[in-house]
Amino acid sequence: MLANSNLIAFGATTDARRSRGFFEGVLELRFVCEDEFAIVYDVNGVSLRIQKVARFIPQPFTALGWSVSSIDRIVQQLMEKGVTFERYPSLEQDSRGIWHSPSGAKIAWLKDPDGNVISFTEPAAA
């Protein structure tokens, strides 16, 4: 039914200015527009709407994620911008916070200014 429809991704923020600084300045997403309800980005053809909310309780699981060709490059670039990657006691992560999953994928997580968990995954080599 929806297989040929376009996906729209959502996030939430209590501070639009801080959120824009992160999504545009740190992640370098392409800004589309902002209104009283949301900030909209074009992420490789997918709309990402960061909803403006009065209160927000971040969840402990990943809210947004990107599949990347080189996690080493992405992690390095983000660390150069001052990003700190999340550490999870149950996972063996390297010094930069990258976890090598049993499937062979490499994954790292960070939080946006509102505490949303964002992941970066380099799929296992085929």
Image (cartoon, rainbow, N blue to C red):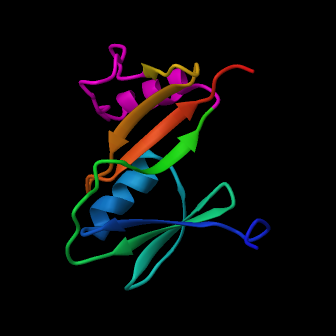
Q: Is residue 73 magenta?
A: yes
Q: Is the magenta stretch mostly helix, strand or loop?
A: loop
Q: In which quarter of the image is the C terminus?
A: top right
Q: Give the residue drawn at x 38%, y 61%.
A: 20
Q: Is residue 124 shown above or below 32?
A: above
What residue occupies the far bottom of the structure in this picture? 36
Residue 90: percent from left, percent from top: 28, 24
Q: Is residue 55 shown above or below 62?
A: below
Q: Is residue 118 left or right of residue 121?
A: left
Quarter of the figure with residue 44: bottom right
89, 13: nearer the viewer:
89
Q: In this view, does 93 lie to the left or right of 29?
A: left
Residue 87: percent from left, percent from top: 27, 28
Q: Does the magenta stretch include residue 107?
A: no
Q: Is residue 116 shown above or below 110?
A: below
Residue 74: percent from left, percent from top: 51, 30
Quarter of the figure with residue 59: bottom left
Q: Give the residue drawn at x 44%, y 24%.
A: 76
**Magenta region, residue range:** 69-98
117, 44: nearer the viewer:
117
Q: Give the residue drawn at x 31%, y 69%.
A: 16
Residue 112: percent from left, percent from top: 32, 50
104, 120: nearer the viewer:
104
Total marks shown come to 0
Q: Quadrant of the N terminus?
A: bottom right
Quarter of the figure with residue 57: bottom left
Q: Give the residue drawn at x 36%, y 14%.
A: 94
What residue occupies the far right of the structure in this picture? 4
